[in-house]
Every structure is written in structure tokens, then in C-alpha cells.
Image (spheres, rainbow, N blue to C red):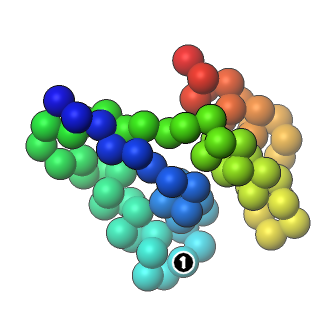
Amino acid sequence: MSSRALDTNVLLRYLTADDPEQSPIAGRLIDQPKENSDDFLVTIPVVCELTWLLRSRRYLAPTRRCSFCTMASSS
């Protein structure tokens, strides 16, 4: 079994659905994993960048929600 790394852009498009072209692609990538590749790798820098972006003026995600995402990803 192998794992695939997800970058910040893919996760951001998936979580926010803010790009009509890229968001559906990110959704398919995450929601329909390929055979023999059920695991995803998300590095700590990606989690940090994603949290920073979600808390930015553009997305205005609540700090509490970002903290939960960060804690959940570390388990």
C-alpha cells in the first residue's frame, strides 16, 4: 500500500470549494482514492500553511475551527 502527499492548494480547494475548475478535481482526488493508495500524507508545513491561509482575510475561518483541524491532523 502506498500513500499520496497532498499539498496546501489541493486541501484548500477541497475545503473551500472556491475555484470552479480546481475544486472538483481536488474533491475527486480526495473522495475517490485510487486502488492500493488509501492513505494520504499531509506534512506539518502543509498543515501550518493551510491554517494560516484559512485564517487570512480571504477565508476568515474561525481560529477555534483552525485549531481543531490542526489538532486532528496531528493524531
Amino acid type of the residue that numbered disc 1 sits on in the rendered structure: Asp
Residue at the location (77% across, 33% down)? 67
Q: Number of callouts in the render? A: 1
Task: Pinpoint residue 66: horizontal percent, then vertical percent.
Answer: 75, 40
Task: Pinpoint residue 28: horizontal percent, then vertical percent.
Answer: 31, 60
Mark 1: which secondary structure? loop
Q: Quick check: 11 left or right of 59?
A: left
Q: Quick check: 35 left or right of 29?
A: left
Quadrant for the N terminus in the image? top left
| Residue nearest the observer in this picture, 38 or 19 | 38
Quadrant of residue 19 within the rendered picture: bottom right
Tell which residue pokes out farthest to the bottom in this image: 21
Q: Which residue is mark 1?
A: 19
Quadrant of residue 73 within the rendered picture: top right
Query: Could you classify mark 1 by the number of other residues whose Cα lies within 10 Å: few (under 14), some (14-19), or many (20 or more)?
Result: few
Residue at the location (85% across, 41% down)? 63
Q: Is residue 53 above or below residue 38?
A: below
Q: Is residue 70 visible?
A: yes
Task: Pinpoint residue 44: horizontal percent, then vertical percent.
Answer: 62, 35
Q: Is residue 18 above or below residue 65?
A: below
Quadrant of residue 22 within the rendered picture: bottom left
Q: Is residue 38 above or below residue 52?
A: above
Q: Is residue 12 above or below residue 72?
A: below
Quadrant for the C terminus in the image? top right
Q: Quick check: 60 left or right of 44?
A: right
